[in-house]
Image: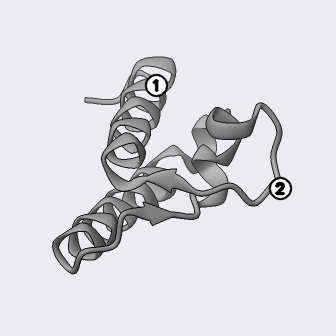
């Protein structure tokens, strides 16, 4: 984790969360995670994997909380 980029990472994650919510509302049931959370899904970065939109929202929330905690934000 790079706390120097934490604020930008948080903005990107919040934007992705909004996008995932819009996709869920449109009936999409699975998404390919963004790079910041893909390691959470697969255990390694750079791998394409689809996850359910509900689980993805939870992963985004978890990553946001991790960044806030580790970098002393919020």
Quadrant of the rendering where the C terminus is positioned: top left
User: In this rendering, is residue 12 above or below 62?
Assistant: below
Relative to 53, does residue 65 appear above or below in the rendering? above
Judge by depth and name the residue closer to the eye, 45 or 74. 45
Give the Cα distance between marks 2 and 1.
20 Å
Mark 1 is surrounded, within 10 Å at the Cα level, by few (under 14), some (14 to 19) or many (20 or more) other residues, namely: some
Residue 2 visible to the viewer: no
Quarter holding residue 17:
bottom left
- Dot 1 falls on a residue whose secondary structure is helix
Q: Position of residue 71 (x, y in %)?
A: 49, 26
Residue 19 position by quadrant: bottom left
Residue in the foreground of this view, choosing between 44 and 15: 44
Residue drawn at 36 percent across, 63 percent down:
29
Residue drawn at 58 percent across, 45 percent down: 37
Q: How is the image coloured?
A: one colour
Measured from the top left, where is residue 34 in percent x and y?
59, 60
The quarter in which the N terminus is drawn is top right
Image depth: mark 2 or mark 1 in front: 2
Q: Look at mark 1 in the image and give the residue it sits on.
A: 66
The residue wearing badge 2 is 46
Q: Inspect this view and state whether residue 17 appears.
A: yes
- Rendered residue at 67%/56% (across/down): 35
Task: Determine contact: label 2, label 1, CB under 8 Å.
Answer: no
């Amino acid at each position: 984790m790079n706390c120097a980029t934490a604020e930008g990472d948080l903005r990107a994650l919040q934007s992705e969360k909004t996008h995932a919510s819009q996709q869920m509302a449109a009936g999409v049931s699975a998404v390919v995670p963004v790079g910041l959370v893909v390691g959470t899904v697969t255990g390694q970065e750079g791998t394409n994997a689809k996850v359910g939109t509900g689980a993805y929202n939870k992963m985004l929330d978890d990553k946001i909380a991790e960044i806030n905690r580790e970098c002393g934000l919020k």
